[in-house]
Amino acid sequence: MTTQHQLHVPVLIAGGGITGLSAALFLLQQGVRPLLMERHRSTSIHPRARGFDIRTMELFRELGVGEAVREAGKALGPAWGVLRADTLAEALKGLKPREGGPITYPSQLKGLESLAALTPESGARCTQDLAEPVLRTAAEERGATLLFYTEMISFSQDDSGVTAVLQNRETGETTTVIADYLIAADGAGSPVRQKLQLPVAGPGVLADFLNIYFEADMAELVLNREFSICIIDTPGIIGFVTAINNSDRWVYQLRYYPENGERVTDYTEERLVNLLHTALGMPELPIRILSVLPWEMTVRVADTMQSGRIFLAGDAAHVMTPYGGKGANTGIQDAQNLAWKIAAVLKGHAAPSLLNSYTTERQPIGLSNAMSSAMLADERGILKDREIMQRAVTAPPKEGEEAKQPEIELTQNIRTLIGIPDYQYPVTVPSQCPPLPADKVLYGLPGTRVPHLWLDEERKRSTLDMLKGRFTLFVHGDTAPWQKMLNGHSVFVQVLPLDGDLAAQWTEATGAAPGDALLVRPDGFVAWRGNVKACAQLPLKELLS
C-alpha cells in the first residue's frame, strides 16, 4: 500500500540533467524555490556533453558556479582539435607537440583577440557527469528541493496550475504536486512533450551509434598532442574517439546498423575490445569497457516550447547532433530565458502573456543550432571535419576597415562556434539607437546581449557581473533623473552610473552620449535605450506585458 501526500510549489521541474539543474539555479537566483524530480538515482554517469561555450560560462559566472565547473573539467581542458586517420596511433604519430603548451579554449588563438575582448569569460571543457554534481550541490545548498529516483506518473493542467503525481521508485510512495508552472527538461524522448502531442520537425534520425566508454592509459601518448575528436574512417570500425580526461578515460562512438539487423547484444565485451584495439592501432593496449550506451544521432525541434503552463527546455525542445557542441548550451540558455519570466509573473510584476515570448525568442535559436549541427554531419553521421577546418579563422576588420563578405561570414561562424552571444531577440518597444558600426558585434542595441566592459583596473568586475538576474539601467552620467522616475515603481531596477574614465569607454562600446541609458533585462539582453529627455517613457510596463 502506497502513502499519498500533497503539496504546492511555484515551479515543478521534470528532469535533473544539465538543463533541469540549471533551471533550478536560475529560479533560485530570482527568489523562486522549485521542486525538481529526476527518475534516475543520480546525476549522469555517462560523460555525454563535454563542454560549455562562452555564453554558458558567462551565465555560470553570474550564478557563482563557473570556476567550480572549470575546475571539475580541468583534465579535459586542453582537448581541442579534430583529427582523422585509419587509427588513433597513426593520427598522433604525425602530430607535433603543441608549442607553448596546451590551449584551454579557441578564443585564445591568435587572430581572435578582438572576439575574446567581447566577454569576461572563456568557454570550458567539462563532461556532463562531472558538471551535473556541481550544479546539484549548488541547487541543494541554495534551497531547491531535489527528488531523485522519483518518476512523474501523471500530470494535467488547467487555468490555475499543473497537477502532477510523483512516485518514489524505491518505496512506491506517491505525492500529488500542485504547481503554478511545469518545466519539462526531461530529455530527447520527453514524455511530457509526447503526452502533450506537441508537433516536431527536422530530419529525424541521422545514424545509430554505440557510445563505448572505456578505460585505457594513453596519457603519455597524447601529452601536448591533446585532441577533442579523432575520426576513424575505416570499414567496420567507422566512428570517432573523444577525449574524456586526456589520460585513461575515453569514449569511442561506433557507427552500427540496427536497420541491418544488428543488435547491441551482438557487441560482446571481447568484440568491443578487439574493435578498439583496431581503431586505436594499439593491439597490446590494456582496455577495460566501462559502459555501452546505444543512441540515435537525431535532429528534431518542437514547433512550440509552451503549452499553457507547461514549458519545454533543452533536449525536450530541440535535439541536435553533438557537432558544434550546442546541445547542452542551448538548454542552459533556454532555462535562463524562462526563469526570470516565470519569476516576474509569479511576483505579480508581469502579465502572464510575457511567457509567450519564451517560444518566440528561444525556439528559433534551438532550430538554428539544431539545423547547423545537422549540416555538419555527413550521410553516415560522421563529422565533416574537412569542411570545418577549411573555415579559416579570420580576425574581424580593424576600425575603419571594410571587411570582405567571405571574411564576415567566416568571423560569424567562429563567433557562433565559441559562443559569443551574437544572436538577437525580437524587439517589442521602440528605442533611440545609433547606427551599428561595421566593426562592432555587440553595441548595446535592443535585442542583443549588453556589451562587456571592465569596471576596474584589475579586470575582475565586468558590466555583466552587475546584473545578477535583475533589471539594470546603465546610465551615461547623472542618474538622478532616472532614479527619480523609477522611485515607487513596483519592479526593482538597479541604476548604475558610468562616468569618469568609464564614460569614454562606454561611449566606445555602445555609442551612448551623456544622458543616455540602456535598460537591460534580467537575462543580460538590452530591452530599450534612450536619452534623458525620454526617461519618462521608460517602457517597463510594456516590456512586462
Image (cartoon, grey):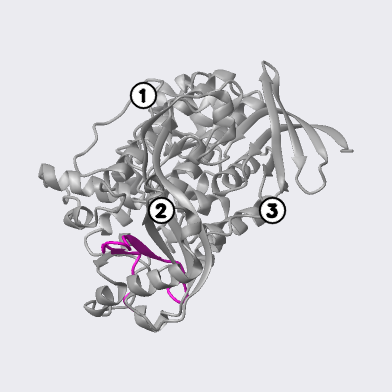
Q: CA distance from mark 2 to mark 3?
A: 25 Å
Residue 267 at what x, y percent from top left?
Answer: 46, 62
Residue 42 at what x, y percent from top left?
Answer: 66, 55
Q: Which residues are magenta?
A: 224-250
Q: Residue furthest top?
A: 159
Q: Which residue is mark 2?
A: 209
User: What type is the residue that disc 1 sits on?
Assistant: Ser
Mark 1 in CB contact with mark 2 (< 8 angstroms): no
Tell me the number on the disc at residue 41.
Answer: 3
**Residue 230 among those drawn in magenta:** yes
User: Which of pointers 2 and 3 lies earlier in the amino acid sequence?
Assistant: 3
- Near-viewer residue (270 or 185): 270
Mark 1 lies on a secondary structure that is: loop
In this rendering, the label closer to the viewer, 1 or 3 = 3
Dividing the picture into quadrants, the one containing residue 405 is: top left
Q: CA distance from mark 1 to mark 3?
A: 50 Å
Q: Which residue is mark 1?
A: 431
**Residue 149 among those drawn in magenta:** no
- Look at 19% across and 57% down and name the residue there: 386
Residue 224 at what x, y percent from top left?
Answer: 33, 78
Tell me the number on the disc at residue 148.
Answer: none
User: Which of pointers 1 and 3 lies earlier in the amino acid sequence?
Assistant: 3
Binning the other alpha carbons within 10 Å of mark 2 as few (below 14), some (14 to 19) or many (20 upward) gives: many
Does residue 460 appear anywhere in the picture? no
Q: Horizontally, is 527 left or right of 14 in the view?
A: left
